[in-house]
Each structure stands twice: as structure tokens, then as C-alpha cells.
Amino acid sequence: MSDPSTVIPIRPGMLTGTDGFHGNTQGETCRRCSVRQFGLFGVLDDDALGDIHTHIADLRLSAGETLFSAQATGKALYTVKSGVVRIERSSEAGERRILRLAGRADVIGLEAALDQTYAADAVACTDVEVCRMPRVLIDDLTHKHPELMHDLMKRWQRTLDDADEWLTEITRGPARHRMLRLLLKLSEYSVGDSLVWWPTRLEMGAMLDMTFETASRLVSILRREGIVEPIDLRHARVNMSALLPALRAESARA
Amino acid sequence: MSDPSTVIPIRPGMLTGTDGFHGNTQGETCRRCSVRQFGLFGVLDDDALGDIHTHIADLRLSAGETLFSAQATGKALYTVKSGVVRIERSSEAGERRILRLAGRADVIGLEAALDQTYAADAVACTDVEVCRMPRVLIDDLTHKHPELMHDLMKRWQRTLDDADEWLTEITRGPARHRMLRLLLKLSEYSVGDSLVWWPTRLEMGAMLDMTFETASRLVSILRREGIVEPIDLRHARVNMSALLPALRAESARA
DNA sequence: CGAAAACTTGATTAGCATCAAACCAGGTGG
DNA sequence: CCACCTGGTTTGATGCTAATCAAGTTTTCG
């Protein structure tokens, strides 16, 4: 939906917004950033942060909006400040597949730093706040502070680890096992107070490679088993003390 | 099998070996390296290559030998010069899963550049020649030539693309479709003359998440359909002009 | 030659996809 | 306000696909 090339212009009115939705005067946003210590610029001191004012913008997306699209020219990297973003791709046959999720403090669209097109789509699963870092800024900063590249490389490795974990744990085995692993994964992206983002059955199917009917049946079963308790349409509570034994029982059978 | 911390010592006798199996005096091996233009050091000129003599070693592995193991301290990156290496991981339940393959000019074990432990095992599928680049050397070179980090980051992105492709194409859909995609993938790692490395049925199963019996049945069917022709136990010929229509027919049904 | 490993094929079963029907919540327009 | 529609969801009936269990064959290698 939202064109990834659309940059929110920083106008005076926006700079005084509440709760982070504002531009970045004198690096103030970055200095106070809630994910600063986890972010790419954690290593920079306040002086360095002062250099990057006006270039970084905070964006908000509603659930369902697209942050960037595969094949589009990668003009910026993004750090997720709140909410959950899904990284997805269409197969050659046209089926959509969710490759992984990104939550608080995760960086997505790294390939933009290489001046490449995005390798996948990024879509907001929930309402989302992200911080947008243009490629030219990254170029600039890595030139002045080469040690930043080390952080970038760590990010790549972390993303790769995540992809590998999906391959070994989420993608493999019988449907029930995959669903249990998904619940475990979702609880990593909790939205406060042991509540997790609760995907649609279609989204579950795209993550676990099953039909939405199978996903629905499994959800019903796990609900009856007390492993998960849907709160409303988009939120649920995962009962870890029931989930973990269920997972152990799985591996015992296999 | 082979301890990843075991470095082949460079002794005079080894330096005169045939066909690349020798150490690296005055960067001679690198200068003449068959994958130099694709490798990490493609951007370095001859002078820079001269700097790195004695640090780089060529290794040979027989099929089945382990190049490095997950959890081991990553002391070196490797460039594959010939043969096929599989990157695999054990799930928490103890099942082995092949995550991706690496062939000529691919770099594996990138995480060693970050002084991290390896994230997966690397095992030779065929006889393999690799070039070993110690982490300290990478540190050194990236310090002297920061532009090298750009190449490293490109490598990470390529590996990530590969992982994503497995997630979207190899991991998804019915068994026959996955097997056809595997044949397509294998033909990227051809060992000359339209011959490809022909995995065991167990290896196919670990790549495609199916039992070796199912893999065997599918192989038999595709052989009867003239899509693949096993030459000997470890080599086969893939008939692309039959494979591609078969893949198109797949997507039509789905 | 005998043993072990890889492979093939068959019979049966379990698991999941497919097709189909009905339900529910939220939103729209009369 | 209600009737209606739409998109997400649940559940059932049925059939196909792939796992499992089980021989039996071929290949490799000591």
C-alpha cells in the first residue's frame, strides 16, 4: 500500500508530536530512542548522534500496510520500535510465504545498505512504529565510523540465524509440531503482559505451510488443551507451562 | 569427523603438491586462484595479495568429512574452490536438516569474521577443495582495506537470499514439487559436462523434509519420466528440457 | 564371501488437503 | 435501527499424499 519511496517530510508541526512520532532535531529522537542501546547506533556517542539530525524519521504504519516491497530500490533500512512486521515473499508459483517476523529492536531491509533492491516484502502485522534510516546516511556514517560495519554484519548474521531457525524448527515436521513452535516464536514478540500478537489463520498457514483450515483445527485443539487462550481477534495468551511440556512430548514421539 | 581446529600445517612437501594443493608463498596461490575474481579478495590488487602470503591455506576434504561444526569457535572463513558442501543443523528434537548447499566460489562460515561460533555444521558432500582464511587475516585486511567489508556484507546478503529461496521454493508444497525444485537447484552445482552431484536418498530427505522412501519413489518416477538419469551412485544428468515443463505443469495445478 | 549400507518397492495407515456448509463480528446503507 | 454483506473462522465429510512398516535387491568393502 504505502509507497516505500514516500518519505514523511519533517515539518515543524510534526516535530512536537507525542510519544516519538516526530522528526529528529539535533538527534534528540535518537538520543532518547527506546531501542537505542539495541539499535545500529548503540556504539555512537552523543556527539555522533548529533550529526545525524534531520535524516532519520519515525514512521507509523497500521496493520496491513506495506513498509517496503521486493524489487523496489532499497532506499532505507528500518529499525522496528514497536509492533510486529512480517517479511514475506511470493514463490514463482505465486504463493505467498512468510519467511520470518521482526519485532522490537530488529533491523530490516539491510540489503538497502548495499544499494540493492529489497529481497522481500515487509508488511505490518500490527500497528507498527519504525525508525527509517536512509542509505546515504548509512554510507556516511560507516565512512566516518568504520566500526559501524561490524554492527551491520552482526545484524546480517542475526537475520541469517533467524532464517535458519525457521528452516529447522518452524518448517519441519507434522502440523501440530509446527504450530507449537509458532506459539513459542510468537511469545518472543509479546505485546506486554504475556499477550502475544495473534495472527489470522491464513497468516499462520503462510508461516507454517498448511491450509488455513488445518491451522484453525489445530488452534481449536490447542485451545481445548489450555495451551493458548485467544483474548480478542488479534491477541492471545500463551500458556508456557502447558506449551513446553507439549513440545517435549512431541520430540519424545519423534 | 575432522576437528575444525585442526589446521593443516604448511610444510615444504605440501607446497609443491599438484593442482592447487599447496600453501601460499608470496600470495602466489591467491594470484592464480581459480575463484579469485569471484572471491572476497577480488578487489585487491597484486600488491595487497602479496601481503597475505602464508596465512591462507588450501584444504582438501573427502566426501563425508566435516569442515567445521556448529558451536565450535569460528577461527576461519572458507571459500569453496570445487565440490559441494552442505550446511546443516540439528533441530532441538535431534533431527538433522540440510539448510543449504555451497559450491564453487561460495564463502561459508562468515560468522567467523565476527568472532562468533559457527551457526551450523559444514560437511563435504563430494570431494572438496576449499581455501581457508583465518579470522585474524580478515580482521587485518578489513582494517587496511575497509572497502572489503562491503564485499563481506554482500556475501551475507547472498547467503540470506539463498536461505530465503529454500524457504519459498524447496521447503514448500507437495513432495514432487520439492523434488523438482531440488533438481533445479542441484543443476546449479554441476560438476562439469551437465553432470550434477547426486545425493543419497537420505540426504534428499534431509533437504526436502521427507522420508528416504518417499525420495526414492519420486526419483524412480522422475527417472521413468526422463527428467533425471542417474549415471553412477553419486552422479546424475538432469534433463532441463524435461524438468522445466514439469515445473510449469506443477504451478499450473497449484 | 559375508556384512553393512544404500536403495527399491509393496501394503497399510495416518495426516492433511480439499470441498462444503454454517457461524460470527464489524461495517454499510437503507 | 436493522438488513445485509464481507472477511475471517469453525467444523464436518471425503479423498489423496506421504509416513510407516516390511521385504527384498544391489552395491561396497573388508
Image: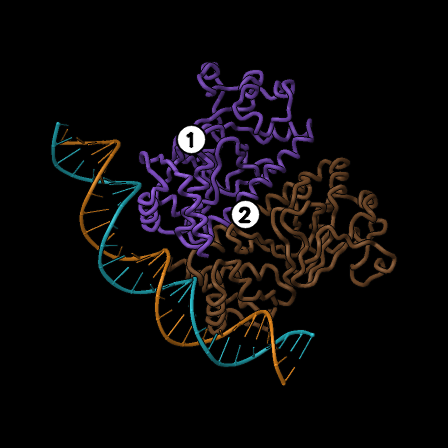
Chain colours: A purple, B brown, C orange, D cyan
User: On the image, numbered disc 2 is attached to which residue?
Assistant: A164
Compared to residue A195, the image places residue B183 above or below, namely: below
Q: Amino acid at mark 2?
A: Asp
**Callout 1 amino acid:** Val
Determine the secondary structure under disc 1. Answer: loop
Chain letter for mark 1: A
Question: A170 above or below B225?
Answer: above
The image quarter containing residue A77 is top right
Is residue A99 found left or right of B101 in the rendered image? left
Q: Using the image as rendered, state which of residue A75 and residue A187 is in the foreground.
A: A187
Name the image quarter holding residue B114: top right
Q: In the shown orientation, is residue B91 left or right of residue B31?
A: left
Which residue in the protein does label 1 denote?
A191
Residue B124: mark:
none
Measured as percent of width and height from the top left, residue A32 is found at 54, 19
Label 2: state its secondary structure. helix
Q: State which quarter of the image contains the N terminus of chain A.
A: top left
Residue in the picture at 81% in, 57% down: B22
Check disc 2: other Cα within 10 Å, few if <14, some if 14-19, many if 20+: many
